[in-house]
Amino acid sequence: LRNLVLVLGDQLDAGSAVFDDFDPARDAVWMAEVAHEATQVWSTKPRIAIFLAAMRQFRDALRARGFTVHYRALDEHAHPDLESALADDLAALKPAKLLAVRPGEWRLAQSLPKACEAAGVRWIERPDRHFYCDDDDFADWAGKRKEYRLEFFYRWLRKREGVLMQDGEPVGGQWNFDHDNRGRFDKRGPGLLPAPRAFAPDATTRGVLAMVNERFAAHPGRLEGFDWPLTTAQAQAALDDFIAHRLPLFGRYQDAMWEGEPWLYHSRLSAAMNLKLLPPRAVVAAAEQAYRDGHAPIEAVEGFIRQVIGWREFVRGVYWQRMPGFLEENALGAEAPLPDFYWTGHTDMACLRDALRQTLDLGYAHHIQRLMVTGLFALLLGVRPREVHGWYLAVYVDAVEWVELPNVLGMSQYADDGRMTSKPYAASGAYIQKMSNHCAGCRFKPGEATGAQACPFTTLYWDFLARHEAKFARHPRTALQWKNLARKPAAELAAIRRQADALRRALAPDSRSKHGVDG
Ligand code: FAD
């Protein structure tokens, strides 16, 4: 065997550089399903299923091209992790070289080359063409900057790639249409929403769903409605469907939430992209074309492209620059445990209940739910960032560490001391009330910080401001928020802080009244 090509679960990229000179007569592909990937964090059933089903679809597609694929299915071997499965097969297959692109997780990017070299096989890493930016590009941009800001990175990359540019200027005359991206639904709600295209599981996928239901029965989540795109063709069809039906209103309602409506105008493409079934260049080109064809307005197209070419590439650059230390960061000294209800959805807080239930059931929540509901609550409560990270990595179908970790530790929990965002995303229940209809059906009142009806977000918000006053009160971007704190009468603030302490005690998983805000 000349080359053994390693394909991990998040590397299902038919255009990968590892296949450039693939010779079916002399080369083979290696893929393995291992339990550790599903249990190192307590993954939801949809998350486990999407990886395994997409891997099996990819295996079958490669075999149909005449490639030999050594595929280790979960129930066919007893290796606990990828390293030991690989070591075993390297000893048996004896390839001259192993070809790979870098794994999407720092831990594996260290351990797999080591396992390979320990087996006496050369590990050859090829560039990952899926992304716009590699480490050197990001380092060039980052230069000596101490703080990384999305806006500058985004402009730099858009210019370099000529995306939504005209004669060196941004199309539409401005870089950013953020102020047009904060719409909310009025009382009548979103009305009839365009249902995203669903992909019915075929026999291969049904086999995976049955296996996951049996083997991972105790894990959260449901597989009844499992309809994610799992092949390149399906991912392309999902993209076409988004561009045709949801992109035009994506921008306006990007930040809006509505009870019982998980998808709204979002693309649902993150999993397909993170599995590398869908190249971001194709996604960006399709969105840009929709603008040029007059199908979607600039604020929708720019807002969407900013997420893909901006945030997605940006967080990846930050991840590889800051690992492994990133994992340990905890700038706000947060030490509370994650409340149990994150794993069950059993809480009376309507916004959290809705976001958690769809997260656990479907493996999906949109950005504002992740940032301003589940993330915000953990930030205000002061949950250990590493525990928050473990939860996010476990629950979402699109969770791969390079993208999950910077979003959680950097953007949402401010654990990196502001290297990624200029201020903590701290808000009270009033924000959720403004952007959704959750509060109307909730027993807590977002305007109240003390008493039986006080919204826990609001109580914890003031407590958060008070706990971190010394750090932020003189910070130019946050001074206003803390000025409002200074206006609170001392007795009122003391009562809020007592209520926050009680909440924190009630929510600690080891306390007897652990679902303190439950019914
Ligand atoms: P849309 O709203 O339609 O956005 C379009 C695309 O832009 C997404 O598919 C995604 O590829 C990209 N994108 C948008 N926001 C971001 C972002 N902040 N970072 C990177 N890419 C972005 N995204 C993941 O892919 N995996 C994760 O594990 C993940 N964890 C997150 C954790 C937290 C705390 C937060 C605040 C955000 C996280 N995100 C993560 C980013 C974002 O929430 C998801 O990409 C998005 O909700 C996926 O749904 P969608 O495809 O419908 O996205």
Image (tube, rainbow, N blue to C red):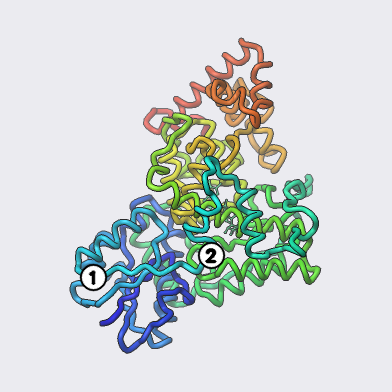
Q: Residue 67's x, y, as percent?
A: 37, 84
Q: Which residue is drawn at 20% across and 67% down?
A: 119
Is the CB of the residue bearing disc 2 within 8 angstroms of ligand 1?
yes
Location of mark 2 (residue): 273
Q: Nearer the viewer, residue 503 or 301?
A: 301
Tell me: residue 192, above or below residue 482. Answer: below
Q: Residue 354 carries which label?
A: none
Tell me: residue 99, above or below residue 160. Answer: below
Q: Which residue lies furthest to the top in this view?
A: 491
* Label 1 secondary element: loop
Tell me the quadrant of the picture where the N terminus can be found: bottom left
Q: Which residue is drawn at 64% across and 48% down?
A: 151
Location of mark 1 (residue): 121
Position of 129 with respect to 304 (left or right) is: left
Is the residue under label 2 in contact with that under label 1 (CB below 8 Å)? no
Amino acid bearing label 2: Met
Amino acid bearing label 1: Val
From where the camera sits, is residue 412 visible?
Answer: no
Marks 1 and 2, the one that precedes in the sequence: 1
Q: Distance between the residues labelled 1 and 2?
A: 31 Å
- Of badges 1 and 2, the one in the foreground is 1
Q: How crowded is mark 2: few (under 14 residues within 10 Å), some or many (20 or more)?
A: many
Q: Residue at x 58, y 41 (%)?
A: 421
Q: Residue 56's x, y, as percent?
A: 40, 74
Q: Which of 39 and 7 is in front in this view?
A: 7
Q: Residue 58's x, y, as percent?
A: 43, 75
Q: Residue 442's x, y, as percent?
A: 64, 36
Tell me: residue 181, above or below residue 288. Answer: above
From where the camera sits, is residue 366 visible?
Answer: yes
Position of 444 with respect to 277 (left or right) is: right
Ligand 1 resides in the quarter of the picture at bottom right
Q: Residues within 10 Å of mark 1 (few under 14, many from 20)?
A: many
